[in-house]
Image (spheres, rainbow, N blue to C red):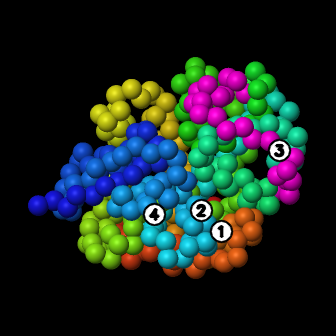
Amino acid sequence: MLRQVKFFLNSFFSGPQAPFFLADDNGHFERNGLEVHFTEGESLAYSVPVLAAGSYDVAYGDMNTLIEMKSVDPDSSPLAVWAMHNRSPYTIAIDADGLVATPADLKGRKLVSHPEDAAWKLFPEFCAATGLDISTVSVEASDLGHDEMVPLMREGRWEGIFGFVNTVRAHTIEAGLDPDRVLRHLEFRHYLPELYGGAVMVTRDFAQKNPEAVRGLLAAINLGLKDAIADPDAAIAAVARRNPRIDVKANRARLLGTLALEMADPEGGRIGIGDADDARILAGANLITKAKGLSRVPKPSEVFDRQFLPPFGERVTSLAERP
């Protein structure tokens, strides 16, 4: 009998989640004794408190939000067990023809963000790292899609958009625009290199009661990632089976962009996709607690538990850019 696993995602079914779906379609979960049920979410940041609330076993969430949670409540439930992004995926997308070129140019500007966007939640850290006075920037919360935001930004309504680099790029394609022509990016990875991005997380209770299920889950995801790298078209087909409304071209670009950018830190060649560096987690925790005025820096072991990872020799190292 297969163990039922409830998995809360970061957004609607989309290209960067393809390794999860391909792991399912190719039987990797089933061979590890699991039947995984996916639920669409709202953002990487939002997934963390949802998992902490206890209705799900697993979530795809933001490591930085988890660090903040552990600073305030060290006994909170979620644990990161598989780091998908070894580079921060976050950005402030700007008009390629606009007046903003550096973080300092954001002074006095108006930006826009989805209400739960993880990039916006990390804006205090971005400002602390760049010397920007956060009080000089206004941010409007909007439920519009990035495909609507980008044209409106170019018309002058805003001068920057919070989001994922590859999410904004994909939605710009959906808007009928060339992201390489109309957008530039203030990428958080350049200013906040210590920060990670998305990670697979489990509840402490699920990990304690079902350690072999967690190992099986990560083994399957690892194989799903390998499958997605080998055949991106099959990966996007797995997404489209769950969300037939997706723009296949844009989501294929989004998947390939994620593999080439957000999962390509040289660290991946040293420790493999899935693992995280304790010194880097601690550096990120120090930055986050200072920027947000929190009193306690959580230990890396409170945030990330690597005991469930596949062996190093089985992890993906081929995505890493060479220094």
Q: Which mark is residue 34?
A: none
Residue 151 lies in magenta, yes or no? yes
Q: Assign a secondary structure to mark 4.
A: helix
Residue plotted at (23% across, 48% down):
26
Separation of residues labelled 1 and 3 (CA atoms): 24 Å
Name the amino acid, label 4: Ala
Separation of residues labelled 1 and 4 (CA atoms): 21 Å
Q: Assign a secondary structure to mark 1.
A: helix
Q: Are marks 1 and 4 in contact (CB under 8 Å)?
A: no
Q: Assign a secondary structure to mark 2.
A: helix
Disc on the earlier residue, 1 or 2: 2
Separation of residues labelled 3 and 2 (CA atoms): 22 Å
Q: Quadrant of residue 232?
A: top left
Residue plotted at (32% across, 69% down):
206
Q: Which mark is residue 137?
A: 3
Name the amino acid, label 3: Val
- Is the residue marked by circle 3 packed among few (<14), some (14-19), or many (20+) residues within 10 Å? few
Disc on the earlier residue, 1 or 3: 3
Q: Which residue is mark 4?
A: 52
- State the quadrant of the N terminus: bottom left
Separation of residues labelled 3 and 4 (CA atoms): 32 Å
Q: Are marks 1 and 2 in contact (CB under 8 Å)?
A: yes
Q: Which residue is mark 2?
A: 64
Name the amino acid, label 1: Gly
Magenta residues, start to end: 130-153
Residue 119: give x, y in percent of width and height: 65, 49
